Amino acid sequence: MSKKKKIGTIIIVLIIVAALIFAYFKFFKKGAKNQDIMTDFVMRGSITSMVEGSGVTKTKNTETLTMLSSGTCDEVFVTEGQEVEAGDPLFTITSTGARSLLESARSNYEGYEKKLSAARKDIAGLNLSPKYSGKVINVVKLNPGDEVYKDAKLATLIDDRTMKLTQYFSYAYKDCFHVGQSIDVSVPELMAVIEGKVEAVNMVSRITKEGSKLFSITVSLPNEGVLTEGMTANASLNVNGETVFPYEAVTLEYNRISDLKSTVTGTVVSSKLIDYLEVEEGEVLVVIDAENADNEIFELEKALDDARTALEKAQKNFDNCNAVAPISGKVIGLSVMPGQEIPENSVLVTISDSNQIYVNGTVDERNISFVKPGMSVELNQWGNMTFGTVETVSWAANINNGVATYPVTIVADNFGGQIQLNSYINYTITASQSDDCLVVPLQAVRNSMLEDGTEVKILYVRNANPEDVVTLAWQDEEIPADFDPVVVEIGISDNSNVEIISGVNEGDEVFTQYIQEQYWG
């Protein structure tokens, strides 16, 4: 064989080997892949979004009676499984502890009521004010920042716009005096006689050392600013041309006198107390900052709430000595019998109203906006079909593995007892439905973002109208060359399709995904 023929043979062999290697890797090597595109068309049809799940059936209303105190069961009027009406007698129990517990709880509650009332009155005194118009004397000098203590006397308040005196006369003249009568009052220090008025006739019985029996009258005098406490005064009355004098002279008294006291402990913010200052009723004289007053009120309010709760429990416990059914329903638990000794904190009976049940369900974030209270729910318990209603929808999501679900409550009537309690039941909610709408497969819709950062839903459309094609901020998958991104607005969806509200037309071909073909040798 010539040298040229040898070289030609070698070249042919190499070509055949290369072809075999290519064929091996393309058609025979395990795991080799070939990509075909999958497309679909925008079609007109109907779509229904369903929410399905399961939950445990519970009674809508269940009441349990518990005995907090010990006692002895006297009589029982019901049996387990019996239907009862609200108010039906259940049993009687003798318990001395129940009454003691109630009395103690009531006393505790009333005690906190009084403390809170007193504290509120005290805190009202943060702005110290007179309860009547008058004059302040014997004042304590206060500066901002000074500490004052509860019940500390800060001044004396006197009402000297009217003065009073009490004088005694012989019973021989008891019929000569009456309330409202004008009477002359002599004030020697002023060398003046002032007209007063009888405010009261007091038929007391004062016996003098001479053996005379006396009654008294109370006289008020207007004060033009010249009368003061301690001045001597005598009231006299002209009777049939004769002047009737009192048994003895007396001294004038202020109409009213009282102490101004701080009702709280705190720091002085401001004070305008000055001796002999004329003040008006309600005028703020001292402002006190009681830092702990609000905390004291808060603590007492909390203690009162706790005491109220304890009283309600004690009252209910006492009522359970002669227990009646709190609701209509079935006795599903009874743990007492006549003669039984009942320890403290014993559960006595449970009554359940099984005429209405509820189920706790969940709705995914895709459908939650469509589910509303009042919507019908299909219920299926072991092939037993019935219907309920969505009662509540919560917008507080539960997040699990990046998926948000929202709690809903479903209620259903169970007057015939067809629904088994405390058992699983399947529910189906028709969240939404659209007829004669445009639909595409779910996998055709992508989440993407435009160059300006706007988040959008897109379809890749074959030979799309150039005016509808958009530019994306990025593209993280390979898309066939003749498919372009078009922004669409979507509606409801089911497990396979999604409604297209706008963006494409019926008959448009859209890219869904690549088909990965496997060849095995």
Image: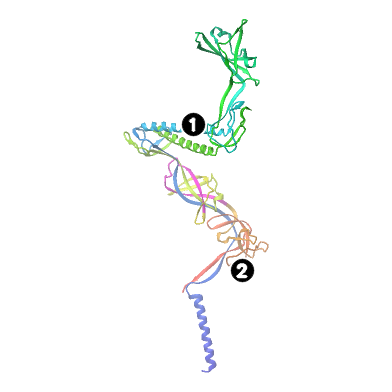
Q: Secondary structure at mark 1?
A: helix
Res. 211 mark: none
| Residue 245 against residue 258 in the figure, above or below | above
Coloured how?
A: rainbow
| Of callouts 1 and 2, the N-terminal one | 1
Q: Secondary structure at mark 2?
A: loop
Image spot of residue 74 (x, y percent)? 33, 32
Res. 481 mark: 2
Query: So how many labels did they put on this image?
Result: 2
Residue at left 48%, top 51%? 53
> Could you say which quadrant of the image residue 231 lies in?
top right
Answer whether residue 515 is magenta in the image: no
Res. 114 mark: 1
Image spot of residue 519 (x, y percent)? 49, 72
In the rendered image, the residue lying farthest to the right is 467
- Horizontal arrangement in the rendering, residue 102 relative to residue 460 (left or right): left
Image spot of residue 326 (x, y percent)? 43, 35
Label 1 – label 2 distance at C-alpha = 85 Å
| Residue 227 against residue 209 in the figure, above or below | below
The range drawn in magenta is: 404-433
Query: What amino acid is found at the position of numbered circle 1 in the picture?
Result: Lys
| Residue 332 against residue 230 in the figure, above or below | below
